[in-house]
Amino acid sequence: MTQTIATARACSNIAFIKYWGNRNSALRLPANGSISMNLDGLETVTTVRFDPALPADRLILDGKEQGGEVLERVSRHLDHLRTLAGIQTRALVISRNNFPTGAGIASSASAFSALTVAACAALGLRLSERQLSALARLGSGSACRSVPGGFVEWYAGRDHDSSHAQSIAPPEHWALVDLVAIVSSAHKAVGSTGGHALAPTSPLQAARVADAPRRLNICREAIYKRDFEALADVIEQDALMMHAVMMTSSPPLIYWLPTTLHIMQAVQQWRQAGLPVAFTIDAGPNVHVITTAEFRAQLSQRLAQIAGVDRVLEAGPGGPTRLLDEHLSAD
Ligand code: PMV
């Protein structure tokens, strides 16, 4: 094989109905389906170059050469794709995030989506969006939702091929905004891979999973009808159910900080006062405050004024992962 290169850009995504816990952790087959919105402008760009001269895979992330567990995870993911292509050539992976890593926005979602799409193109694999989504899932579950565009549903599925994500509405369907209130940029003690493994230790997980089809239906309908009130109630309930599972796992995972709770209470008060606003929280202390484009500036300002909020990132609905013509260079 001669050198081959490709570059892809992927958005991060925020789950409205959360993925937490696996039915099969090797394949990252989730315990329940999930629904998310891609986050426009919160992106990863990744160039993958397969090079027969390389003795081992290399990863340069935001300008820094990576080793250890971070490189191994990328290398393991490339192994799946190399097996599909029937080659063993090692790769140089150069990746850049335009948002702070570990800021509580899922960098693994955009990272593994961009990596999968770029690597498959560089390998000359001709795959459908559905196949690319299922492959991205092997790197990080939520990454399968960053492959298609706009509002996306990940069907839990029964096996590798059926566990994939698909767009349920394009980005322009609904001008929602995610205001990410950054409370702490510190790296979390227990990341999502470790967290998924703990989910079954909570006696609440079975109830959360059993009720998931109901929440998925309400969320999907709310998106179709652009019904903010219905969306607000279901996403807050879903996030609280996931955090109830986290908090009751053995050992317990408590991701919230005092400021997290202040923001949650402020959001509920603002909604009672008539504003279209709701919160959701991933595996970290930062709060994703969902509103409509009309209220973006007003709510962003209000959030920035809450003591303990470092900064507010803003994103509307984003498109699918796309190949780019220009490649990143190592320096
Ligand atoms: O894809 P992972 O393993 O990073 O898990 C994501 C888990 C949550 O962000 C908490 C929920 C979700 O559905 O994105």
Image (cartoon, rainbow, N blue to C red):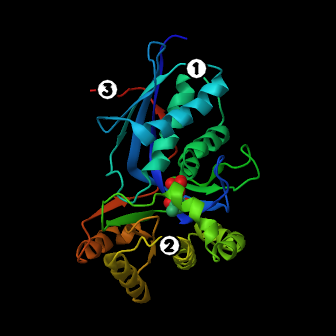
Marks 1 and 2: which is nearer the front?
A: 2
Sort mark 3 into few (<14), some (14-19) or many (20+) by Cα contacts within 10 Å: some
- Using the rendered image of the protein, determine whether residue 23 is visible from the camera's viewpoint: yes
Residue at 42% of width from left, 70% of height from top?
255
Assign the C terminus to one quadrant of the image. top left
Q: Classify residue 302 by image quadrant.
A: bottom left
Depth check, mark 2 against mark 3: the one in front is 2
Mark 1 and mark 3 lie on one chain; the one further toward the N terminus is 1
Q: Residue at x 62, y 38 (%)?
A: 132
Label 1, label 2: how far apart the Cα atoms are: 41 Å
Q: Secondary structure at mark 3?
A: loop
Residue 330, numbered label: 3
Residue at (37%, 80%) from the top-left corner? 261
Pick whichever, 68 or 135, lies toward us.
68
Q: Amino acid at mark 2?
A: Pro
**Residue 179 rendering spot, x and y as whole percentages:** 36, 65
Q: Position of residue 154 (x, y in %)?
A: 64, 55
- Under mark 1, the amino acid is Gln
Mark before the other along the chain sequence, 1 or 2: 1
Tell me, yes or no, whether the two marked residues, 2 and 3, touch with CB atoms within 8 Å.
no
- Vertical arrangement, residue 15 with respect to residue 90, above or below: below
Q: Position of residue 11 (x, y in %)?
A: 45, 48
Q: Is mark 3 within 8 Å of ligand 1?
A: no
- Which residue is labeled 2 in the image? 252
